[in-house]
Amino acid sequence: MKRTWRAVIIVAGVLAIVYGYTWASAYSRSQAFMRAALSDLARGDISLAIKGGKVLDPRRNVYVTHGGLQAVIETWESPWALPSPRLYGQAVAELDAVIDGKLDAPTGLAIIQQYARLDRKFLDRIALKTASLYADQGRAEEARELYQESRELFPQDKAFQARVDAGLKALDAVK
């Protein structure tokens, strides 16, 4: 019986060490990605700050993964990624602040055009915000076109479709 408990304790210990190492590695990578995203925002590169990407490291002459808010969020959004660090909440809050306050219509449209076929995460929010910005600027046709095109990006998302419909109705009411 003692051998069984000893084996269980050893296995549990090994698992705890492996999980701790993995968690610490993910946290360290997330910190680097968050620093990169904040640096990108300070330089005005909203697209790279949100989505991240591959950038050339001139010292090594190779492309390296350059973090973004999306990378931080994706690392910690799994229910198995416990404990979730404050960094996750900070990344979510920063993403909200960027989309809701720093995103302009041309940048939003550029992000949508660049990532529509690659990675659609957060594009629904960016599309709605960009269309809303166009509408606020009195550019109703561009807003309408973006609403209609974005409908095709997320055809299965009923909540998104309802928000698109509401945006189109608001445009029609202004006519």
Image (cartoon, helix red, strand yellow):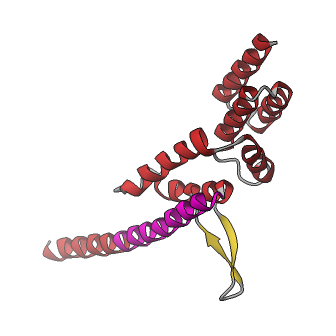
Q: Nearer the viewer, residue 26 or 30?
A: 30
Q: Is residue 142 magenta?
A: no
Give the image location of residue 76, x and y in percent. 46, 55
Q: Over which residues does the magenta segment extend?
A: 19-44
**Residue 91 in view of the camera:** yes
In the rendered image, residue 173, in percent from the top left (x then y), is placed at: 76, 11
Instruction: Looking at this view, name the residue that lies furthest to the left.
Output: 2
Magenta highlight: main SS: helix
**Residue 129 vertical placement versus 74 (above, below):** above
Q: Position of residue 52 (x, y in %)?
A: 63, 61
Q: Is residue 20 magenta?
A: yes
Q: Quadrant of the N terminus?
A: bottom left
Q: Using the image, determine if residue 29 lies above or below residue 112.
A: below
Task: Kindly indicate the quadrant of the structure image that contains residue 108.
Answer: top right
Residue drawn at 75 percent across, 29 percent down: 137
Name which quarter of the figure residue 6 lies in: bottom left
Q: Nearer the viewer, residue 92 or 102?
A: 102
Residue 79 position within the rendered picture, expressed as x and y whole percent measured from the top left: 43, 50
